[in-house]
Amino acid sequence: MTALTARQVYQSMRDAALGIRPLQRIGEQSAAGLMQVDIEGWRLTLEVDGNHLRHCQHCQSPDGREGVFDSWQRTDPVSLLSAWELTQIECLLADLKTVV
């Protein structure tokens, strides 16, 4: 099974920013600033500093493929987001209620 590329993870985040797919928080944000979210079966672990999304640390797609920050070779999925998309995701993260 091939690993997820940064672009594939970006696409799920882009869809959430555009309102095509819902974004839900899973559990509480950790003291280290890590937040787990779900975008229609895409499980992402995001690094959030205050209200600012910094990086995607890990992602698992609905079919079980995974990608991690260290494997994306200088291109984090968050860096592919436009300024508007990033702002939309940060607003969604700030407004999220936890889903168990």
Image: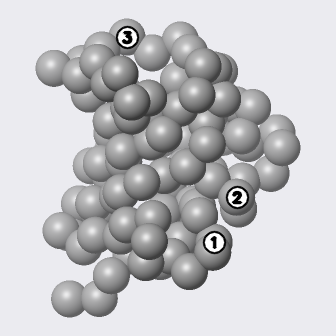
Residue in the foreground of this view, choosing between 15 and 45: 45
Closer to the chain start, of discs 3 and 1, is 1
**Quadrant in which residue 38 is drawn:** top left
Q: Is residue 73 left or right of residue 61?
A: right
Q: Disc 3 and disc 2: Cα gap in Å?
A: 25 Å
Asked if the residue under mark 2 is in contact with the one under mark 3, i.e. CB atoms within 8 Å, the reply is no
Amino acid type, callout 3: Lys
Residue 21 % position (x, y): 47, 41
- Residue, x 63% and y 72% (percent of image)? 75
Residue reaching furthest to the right: 83
- Check residue 79 in the rendering and tell me which mark sits there, or answer none: 2
Q: Residues within 10 Å of mark 2 (few under 14, many from 20)?
A: some
**In x, y percent, where is residue 35?**
38, 32
> Amino acid under label 1?
Thr
Binning the other alpha carbons within 10 Å of mark 1 as few (below 14), some (14 to 19) or many (20 upward) gives some
- Which residue corresponds to mark 3? 97
Question: Can you tell which of label 3 and label 2 is closer to the viewer?
Answer: 2
| Residue lying at the far bottom of the rendered structure | 1
Residue 79's spot in the image, x, y percent?
Answer: 70, 58
Q: Which residue is mark 1?
A: 75
Q: Quadrant of residue 33?
A: top left
Q: Hey, what amino acid is under mark 2?
A: Ser
Name the element at disc 1: loop
